[in-house]
Image (tube, rainbow, N blue to C red):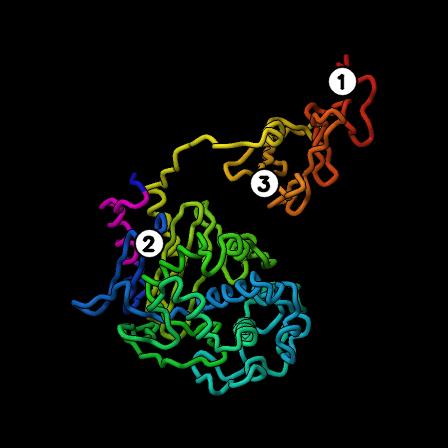
Amino acid sequence: MTTPHEELLPATRRALLHRIAVAQAEGRAPSLVAAVVRGGETVWNGARTSVEGHGPDANVQYRIGSITKTFTAVLVMRLRDEGALDLGDPLEKHLPGTGVGEATIAELLAHTAGLAAESPSPWWERTSGSLRPELADVLGEQPHRHPVGRRFHYSNPGFTLLGALVEQLRGAPWEEVLRREVLEPLGLSRTTWHPEAPHAGGWAVHPWADVMLPEQVEDLGRMGPAGQLWSTAGDLARFAVFLARGDERVLSAKSLLEMRTPAAPGEVADVVAGAAYGLGMQLQRRDGRLLVGHGGSVPGFLAQLTISVEDDMAAVVLTNCTSGPVLSEVAADLVRIVAEAEPRIPEPWRPLTEVDPSVLELVGPWYWGTYSFVLRLTVEGGLSLEPLAATLRGAGFRRNDDGSWTGLNGYFAGELLRAVRRPDGTVSHLDLGSFVFTRQPYDEGAPVPGGVDPEGWRAIG
């Protein structure tokens, strides 16, 4: 094992190289470049190519397709945090006349607005954006395929609308706003609207013969916020660190956690596969860990950005072919290889430097009826309610100014936890969304709903 900022072990580096070599060879990719991030630092770069004596590096641009959507989502969340909009607002409130009804901004971010997956013919990824100069051209006469808010249905026009929303509220082109508010603060100088040398050319590889055809590159125009950007493994590695940790100059860690939280009901197959969608971010349960990020696909290019927040790791994989290796699997494997070969070393345990006595007296065992729980004080100063039986519900809590606590996750998310005190100031019980938690099972000294049998606990002979 190593500490987070040391170099990876030789065996780990070879395993990573082997994985991308297999992907490039079996996927018949003209080139493939990858990077691995751990502890906020890029700890490995690798590349494979079909061109003898020349290989891409972390500074070579590839088109990243729908990873662009995550950049667009960050811009929208910035507007929300500034108070310029609410995620529950109908799009029409800020961008009238689109014809998408009462679809909210959150529904557009989560692909639950019911909009079509694609723009009307001709195929927008292989034609000039000048064919779709207005939003009406992107949406067509019948923009909806499903009722608003009822199901997840991936929509490229939906993110075109979000890009137009950013332009409307900022009074500037989407790409200018992105550069000023995200790219420059994060130092992503190699992420651009148009390709800038050095960059890879896009190729189509014949499905039944080892021959290639160059793919054309189109300016997607209005559709740009859904898939236009070019970037590098180096830039996307830095973007991955931001998505995991936040940067107050751009977006807080709290808002990014909101983006990484499931927001869309999935298909049955997605539920079985452990897949979900947040706000501009894809989520996948794989190899026992939660992976978040986004993939991208446009003619000539495939891209993947994958983060394991729990492992403090990320992987980026880029290639220049229309179809080829399954990059989501490659990126997940890169994370797994490092996480298993060199597991993260936890920070040393340290005692708290201060504690509120009124909070400390709440910790320990509590009972909801006959169910056992433990209330713990967290390092961050919150509370964690942990059931002693795996089938029960637990939650974390954040303290409020009035001394109550708000649930942060699970069944008790948003519910209030209050310590109810007797006239002498001692704690009588906890009230959690009307549930009464007592220090003893069915404590007769606490106001248990329905009361407690006056004969108390008994043996039955």
Q: Quadrant of the C terminus?
A: top right
**Crowdedness near tag 1: few (<14), some (14–19) or many (≥20) residues, C-alpha within 10 Å:** few
- Residue under pointer 2: 36
Where is 35 relative to 135, above or below?
above
Q: Is residue 416 visible?
A: yes
Where is 107 relative to 392, above or below?
below
Give amino acid for label 2. Answer: Val
- Residue under pointer 3: 396
Mark 3 → mark 1, Cα distance in angstroms? 32 Å
The part of the image, by quadrant, that contains residue 50 is bottom left
- Given residues 138 and 14, the one toward you in this image is 138
Mark 2 → mark 1, Cα distance in angstroms? 59 Å
Give amino acid for label 3. Answer: Gly
- On the image, the x and y values in percent for residue 45 come to 27, 57
Which residues, given as a range, are shown in magenta? 4-22
Q: Is 260 inside the magenta-drawn segment?
A: no
Mark 3 → mark 2, Cα distance in angstroms? 31 Å
Q: Earlier in the sequence, mark 2 or mark 1?
A: 2
Q: Is 19 inside the magenta-drawn segment?
A: yes
Q: Earlier in the sequence, mark 3 or mark 1?
A: 3
